[in-house]
Image: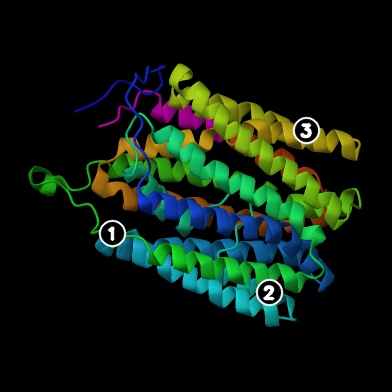
Amino acid sequence: MSSPDLTAAQPLGRVPRMPLSRDARLVFAAKTTRTFCYGALGVLIPVHLARLGLDARGLGLAVTLTLLSSAALTFAVQQPARRWGPRPALLGLAALSVLAGALFLIARDPWLVVLAAMLGNLAVGTGETGPFQALEQVVVTRASTREDLTRALSLYNLIGYVASAFGAALVARLPTPAAVFALFLAGAALQVLAYARMEPLPPATPAAGTRAAAAPSRPLVRRLAALFALDSLAGGFVIQSLVTYWFYTRFGLDLAQLGWIFFGTQILSGLSLLLAVRLAPRLGLVNTMVFSHLISNLLLIALALAPTVGVAVVLLLARHLLSQMDLPTRQTFLMLAVEDHEREHAATLTNTSRTLAQSVSPTITGWIMQGMSLAAPFVLGGGLKIVYDLLLYVTIRNVRTR
């Protein structure tokens, strides 16, 4: 049965909120631990690699390799997750992060550091992408009522941004890069413990009457995967590692200053998730995700023209206040637009397409920053994102949930 059009404002009613399941709480704990470490590494790694001798081209290639690895991991966990449920796949990913933490501690060559980032699925953007998010959002969805889904996914993403913000602020207070790497190793071990305590529940299966058409939403998911790939291709031009490098090179900021700037961006990104919870019931999921994203991309283009570091920071912070309002609304839309047994496939396919597309841009960006202009990627990325916003609106404005 179809429900009303999601582009219109929908009253959510006074349905009692259900408490999150034990598995969802464990996912929240793992997310907090992981993104705290990602926040620290996201600031440290670009500067650490530059100190080890990588230039802008080398850094762009390093980011591309990290994203390709993340896409490969996201694709690899799809079949195990559909067959046995998310828990075994999450345990395997956390074990790889433990291995990555150990490699970080012993690596002295920049490309060994890059290999560790690849194994650890290092989140190099302002928000997390990849296999962890693809599987965890399915766990959270199944733990939530429809009325509370946007709120639950907003909270899931919010704790990631807040934890990442404190990780970014902490990085300058740790004495050496080795201390940050040891923190990542400890966090990975805690994730293993959290996932090990989850219930080994079987995956969802199609109802008996629908087995003949077990994937009715696949055409829509493929269209969305293509659009999300365009958005991530554009996002790869302004990924956090390269924005960090831009501030470091353009204005000569040190680690402490960079840490506080990205502490601010993560906090404001978290606030944008709370704004999404307030606006989505009034404006509709589609209107909320598209128009907030459109305005944030205009601010991104303006960032390229910032004459001083103060103006640049203000524009960056303003953008992050709006830029993530599309995240929980997009996740909610996707989870409600497909059958329950299709959710692992939908989440992993869209995350894989996003990560693969994003992996193309950083290498190109490195060449553009090195040979053309440090600020050119902001204009290119913002322009492509505006194209995505318009195409997404045309594609899904009349889509109905099942």
Q: Is residue 390 magenta?
A: yes
Q: Is residue 108 left or right of residue 143?
A: right
| Image quadrant occupied by the N terminus | top left
Figure check: 150 above or below 11: below
| Image quadrant occupied by the C terminus | top left
Residue under the point 82% across and 68% down: 175
Residue under the point 31% across and 63% down: 79
Q: Is residue 384 magenta?
A: no
Residue 315: give its label: 3
Q: Nearer the viewer, residue 391 or 150?
A: 150
Mark 1 and mark 2: Cα distance apart in space? 32 Å
**Of helix, strand and loop, which one carries label 2?**
helix
Residue 82: give its label: 1
Dot 2 or dot 3: first in sequence order is: 2
Tell me, yes or no, whether the two marked residues, 2 and 3, touch with CB atoms within 8 Å: no
Q: Can you tell which quarter of the image residue 186 is in?
A: bottom right
**Of helix, strand and loop, which one carries label 3?**
helix
